[in-house]
Amino acid sequence: MSTPQRTLQGIPDIRLFFHRNETPIYFVSATNFNLLGIDEWVRNFRFISYIDCFDGQHPNVLSPSEIPHRPFTSIEDINNYLLEHKEVVDFIRGRTRDGNAGKAVFLFFDEQTEQLCEQLGLEVCFPKAKLRQEIDNKIMTTRIGDRAGIASVPNVLARLESYQQLRELTGHLGEHVVIQTAFGDSGHTTFFISNEDDWNKHADEIIADPEVKIMKRIRCRGSAQEACVTRHGTIVGPLMTELVGFKELTPYRGGWCGNEVLAEAFSQDVRNKARDMTFRFGEELRKLGYRGYFELDFLRDLDTDELYLGEVNPRVTGASAMTNLAAFAHADAPLFLFHLLEWADIDFELDVEALNARWSDPDNIDSWGQLVIKHTADSVELITSAPKTGIWRLRDDGSLEYVRMQTHRRTVESENEAFFLRIAKPGDYKYEGADLGILITPGRLMTEEFAMNDRARAWTKGILSQFTSRPLQAAETEASVQVAEVGSFKMM
């Protein structure tokens, strides 16, 4: 990035700095969903995406043509494929100026990604993959929280080898427990155990881990909060609700399937407590050498009203579009810009305390929600048509109308309109757990009891009705099985 000699003094200088940015910055991932709209804030920001959600209509997305590759088993595999793709290499080299290839950001990356970036001359604008993996470990998260004075649900950390051992270690936690392995998506690696039959269903996965987290099962609701560790302290975004396990959206009992940004969903006391916990966790991360974007999940006990630490995602997340496109972000700057500042080779001054106070003020929080829509049936079919990315309108009769192409939610005006980002396209396989698309719309998507409301169901039904598919032919079966086996890794 260009480096003025003076120190940036507050938000106006920071906004101007990125408006004039001359250094190429790339977000490399399966899609550009997580950082929707950032290209409008940062000059020379480009998306390099495996999936073209916009059919070539997004001015700042490069989606290279498909070339032969090994089956993907992770987002890291996708990113490494992209960084070795000739079209991507040529694109990056074509924008290199005075030997400066630019900077790269990712949703997920590994040490091979770091090596490929080094070969291309790209600086990775995240802490090292090794540190991120250590922090992403749910066992490590619990211990970091303990050091920061942040309580987790009553738990035991141990290696389990038998059901009898489980009961001996966790008798004080009650009959019903929840077991989480160290890594993985909560929809795939969270196990609800009440008896030996439950244990037997998941024993192989549990025993394979060197250490698991065994928690008391509580009646709870999930919430999420994104933040950014900076040299001046941890900046904290708004507390969001989480949609979890809704059968219309996900086949996974504990699977995340959306969020709401809604001030009245939480009391001011709960918002203040969550903000304080997130700030303290961020400061503990800073001691470990971590800087930049992260997200905390919280569990609120409905019986005791206690707020517990759930897990940490040391990265941008599936909720990042909600945080970075919110009204408070437009009034100041998206949270992700403060992440980029940490790698901008420039000094800046920032009143973190004042910013956190503004961002927790309910008057500065507008109401939006998102639905992450997966294929929920245990079937595999070939998609023959799919809804386009853009603005859609929900008619009174429940049918949908495509209004226009758009790159994010900016021009959505009312609760009967939404921005839909298509992920699965014609020619893709639709299998259990496959991501179909994400819908973002103003207003609530859940009732006061945190069930899906009628409007959310109408939007979900309407979008699903826009997908058509057919049974597989014999020649397609083998390929589709392989896709289904490796394709259900965490995309967001």
Image (cartoon, rainbow, N blue to C red):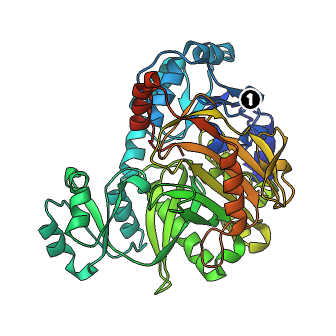
- Residue 414, compared with residue 437, is above or below; it is below
Closer to us: 286 or 293: 293
* Image spot of residue 47 (x, y percent): 66, 31
Relative to 384, 375 lies left or right:
left
User: How many numbered callouts?
Assistant: 1
* Image spot of residue 296 (x, y percent): 51, 61
**Callout 1, which amino acid?**
Asn
Is residue 351 something that shows in the picture?
no
What residue would you read off at disc 1? Answer: 60
Is residue 244 something that shows in the picture?
yes
- Residue 304, compared with residue 50, is above or below; it is below
Q: Quadrant of the N terminus?
A: top right
Relative to 478, 240 lies left or right:
right
- Residue 75, compared with residue 479, is above or below; it is below
* Image spot of residue 201 (x, y percent): 25, 58
Q: Quadrant of residue 103?
A: top right
Point 48% across, 41% down: residue? 431
Q: Mark 1: few, some, or many residues within 10 Å (few <14, many ≥20)?
A: some
* Image spot of residue 334 (x, y percent): 71, 51
Relative to 453, 118 lies left or right:
left
Point 74% across, 28% down: residue? 22
Closer to us: 383 or 342: 383
Point 23% across, 72% down: residue? 195
Closer to us: 155 or 439: 439
SS class of the residue under badge 1? loop
Q: Quadrant of residue 93?
A: top right
Instruction: Please identify the residue farthest to the bottom as the structure is shown.
Output: 304
Point 71% across, 60% down: residue? 458
